[in-house]
Image: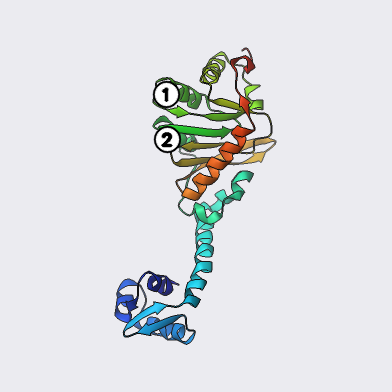
Amino acid sequence: MQVLTTLTENPRTREQLREELPISRTTLARILNEFEEREWITCRGKEYTTTRESEAILARFDPLLETVRGIENLGEAIDWLPPPANAVDLRHFTDAVITTTVDTNPTAPFDRAYELIHTADRYRAVTNTAIPRYVVTLLERHNQGALDYEGVIAAEFIETLDDADRVESWEGLAATGRTWVYDGQMPISMHIVDQTVLIWLGKVEQNELQIYGLLESDNAAVLSWAESLYQEYRTESRMLEPTMIPSP
């Protein structure tokens, strides 16, 4: 496949292929002879080039290879993806970064998300819960004009607010006119920070979601999916009004 991919880019001589690819002379000779017999490549002068047959094979093989790479990159985190993320082709997670909780730093995923949120210019989110320091930072940076903020929060979370400081922060977010409440089940917590998508990873244990890590992706396809999902939730949500927030 490396030989075919290389030849698809530009025609190459046998010597050029040997210089570019980690293949022995005898192995390369066998591959080229076999490909010529199958009519997957042709030789013009001293240069080899691909045929329509091999290009059709690559068109099917490359996505499969990328899917395998995506699965390998996710590792055990593939079992921690929230259900809506199953709509994303796994090959788009090839370059995703996974930050997990570890004994030496159990808050590593939360610290990483905060680091990105704290320096963002634009923020959108669909979340079924909210970490207090995130909320404070979002409100402060939005009020300072440093952050373009929008967010959709699960209604059942708003109903649980019973702390004076948290209530004050959420009243502030409500006053921005850029926070919406979703009344249904929200099986995902996701942030779009500038052009980066953050997805919380975990499993439900004893009726509670346990967070195991954070997935971070700059992939264009993942971003497109996240933006579409955000718009779906926002369209089906209602504006958060200060009067909707319970008194502490």
Task: Give the left or right position of residue 46, taking residue 122 as reference.
Answer: left
Task: Give the left or right position of residue 140, taking residue 160 as reference.
Answer: left
Task: Quarter of the image for the N terminus: give it.
Answer: bottom left
Q: Quadrant of residue 190 in the image?
A: top right
Residue 201: x and y, percent?
Answer: 56, 42
Residue 219: x and y, percent?
Answer: 46, 49
Identity of the residue drawn at 31% across and 84% down: 46
Q: Is residue 159 visible?
A: yes
Label 2's element?
A: helix
The image shows residue 48, relative to residue 135, as above or below, that is: below
Residue 227: x and y, percent?
Answer: 53, 41
Identity of the residue drawn at 47% across and 80% down: 40
Task: Identify residue for label 2.
Answer: 116
The image shows residue 154, relative to residue 96, as above or below, that is: above
Identity of the residue drawn at 63% across and 36% down: 209
The image shows residue 137, relative to residue 185, as above or below, that is: above
User: Which residue type carries mark 1?
Assistant: Arg
Residue 169: x and y, percent?
Answer: 52, 18
Task: Give the left or right position of residue 153, taking residue 142 as reference.
Answer: right
Residue nearest the observer in this picture, 65 or 71: 65
